[in-house]
Amino acid sequence: MDLDNIKKSWQEREIKPTISEEKIQRMLDNRGKNALENLMTFEKWGLLVGLLCLPCSFIFDEDFLFFFYLASVICMLIWQTYKYKFLKKINLSKIGILDISIAITKYRKYIFAELILAILWIFIFMGSFLYLKIFKRIFAHLEETSTFNLSITLSIAIGTIFTLALTAYVLYRYIYMQNIKQIEKSIAEIKDFEQDNG
């Protein structure tokens, strides 16, 4: 039985229940624990992906791409470690509702900023990659390249960049936002429950 049905039945019977902080924490722990564990799992996977991406920096023969990619992956690993440690500090059964709410709001802001940076990174890195690997050669032989081939290549490049950016957005919504919303929903229900029965 969910919280709405419990509140409704109590209101119909005009019973004023007393509920302890421990019971509230158990309700939050049951509903929000899976979402928090999912977020921590995603952060661990992010660390693993970052570690696997680190050696890929050596495939780039242009200095800019090599250093930009390497610096990006190192920053990503540091950031993933910070986010994982931040989530690990959120103990649903030991800290209060207000502290959990503040931490999740802060984490949501982190993820939003990360999404913006990820999309910017895609545009900068892929734009640089495509320019240095494809368009630099085309522009060097511009008189030999037909306008049609140039426009097709440019369209494919822009389409690729926008597809990657859209994929990043969808993944962030699926991986992070759904779980954050689940925790926020649990917190909101408990706050409503406390107000109705306070």
Image (spheres, rainbow, N blue to C red):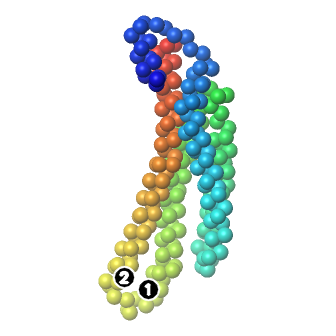
Query: How many angstroms separate mark 2 from mark 1 (CA)?
Result: 8 Å
Do the CB atoms of the residues marked 2 and 1 lie less than 8 Å apart? yes
Provide the secondary structure element on which disc 2 rests: helix
Amino acid, disc 2: Leu
List the residue tagged with mark 1: 138
Q: Is residue 177 above or below residue 76?
A: above
Kindly identify the residue that appears in the image at 48 percent across and 38 percent down: 181
> Of the residues under marks 2 and 1, which one precedes in the sequence?
1
The picture places residue 143, in percent across and down from the top left corner, at: 38, 92
Identify the residue under disc 2.
150
Taking the spot 44% from the left edge, 53% from the top edge, the residue there is 170
The kind of residue on which mark 1 rests is Ile
Whether residue 98 is visible to the viewer of this picture, yes or no, is no
The residue that appears at 48% across and 71% down in the rendered structure is: 127
Question: On the rendered structure, is 172 left or right of 88?
Answer: left
Residue 44's place in the image compared with 140, above or below, is above
Is 54 situated above or below 4?
below
Which residue sits furthest front? 1
Q: Could you say whether the residue bearing mark 1 is in a helix, strand or loop?
A: helix
**What mark, if any, has residue 99 been given in the picture?**
none
Q: Quadrant of residue 57?
A: bottom right
Is residue 7 in view from this perspective?
yes
Question: In the rendering, at what x and y percent does residue 41 appear?
Answer: 61, 47
